[in-house]
Image (tube, grey):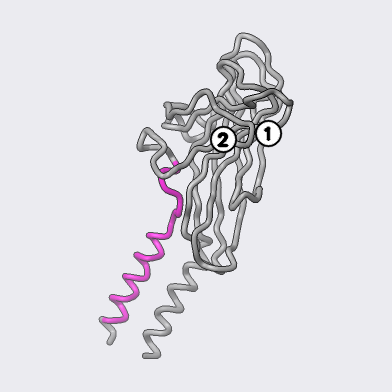
Amino acid sequence: MRSVIVGMAALLCLAVAAQADVITNGGFETGDFTGWTVRPTANGQTTVQDVIMYDIDGSGPYGESLAARFCVGEVNHYSQWEGIELVQDVSLVGGTEYTFDADVSAWSQNPYNNYDGGKFELILDGAVLDTWNAGYIEINQKLYGHVSGTYTPGASGPYEIGMRITRPWTPPTYIYQLVDNFTGIPEPATLTLLALGGLTALRRR
């Protein structure tokens, strides 16, 4: 019986480890958008959609790595926030708290000043968990941000997580919005309780 419990404990630990991150290709290390869907907002577009080498946090600890790059804005100019949504479906466990994080950046290579580098909204099933607005961006400037939010689903099943990236103008030349290090991590204490609950059930049997 002891060997069974030990074996099941190992399996439970592996199950916990397997749930360490629910996001697929959150660092865009495949060099493309594997696992992700990019779709325009109602009057939105992006004139750039690729994955490039980029330092997403400037003087921070990460250094240069692959990141998703866009150049978003309106199709028809009405001075409204339009662009794209970068989303993917994830499977969440009901009652488990998840923390979603992503690093974001606005980068201007425009020879003219521009009034907005872009707004980044962390969204889950369309609801906004957190927002970072780059605001005014100058010539050859890079601005860095981070979005983070927690969510506890009421039931297990599929949910849509992602980033809404918008600007209130048509896409300018060489003003980019970038995303990297997108993660969705279950709260460790919750996973530990699930594992312990499984072991307790085994001992009782």
Q: Main secondary structure of the magenta part?
A: helix
Q: Where residue 53 sits: x, y (%)? A: 42, 26
- Residue farthest along the left direction in this orientation: 3
Q: Where residue 65 sits: x, y (%)? A: 42, 31
Q: Residue visible at 49% across and 35% down?
A: 61
Q: Residue visible at 53% across and 38% down?
A: 39
Q: Where residue 46 sits: x, y (%)? A: 55, 27
193 on left or right of 166: left
- Residue farthest along the bottom direction in this orientation: 205
- Foreground residue among 148 and 39: 39
Pointer 2 residue: 40
Q: Secondary structure at mark 2?
A: strand
- Under mark 2, the amino acid is Pro
Instruction: Place residue 97 in its image quadrant.
Output: bottom right
Mark 2 or mark 1, whichever is nearer to me: 2
Mark 1, residues whose alpha carbon is within 10 Å: few (<14), some, or many (≥20)?
many
Q: Is residue 197 above or below residue 36?
A: below
Q: Is residue 99 above or below residue 61?
A: below
Q: Where residue 106 sits: x, y (%)? A: 59, 27
Q: Are marks 2 and 1 in contact (CB under 8 Å)?
A: no
Pointer 1 residue: 133
Give the position of the C terminus as an image quadrant. bottom left
What residue range appears in magenta?
4-26
Calculate the distance from the C-alpha at mark 2 to the C-alpha at mark 1. 19 Å
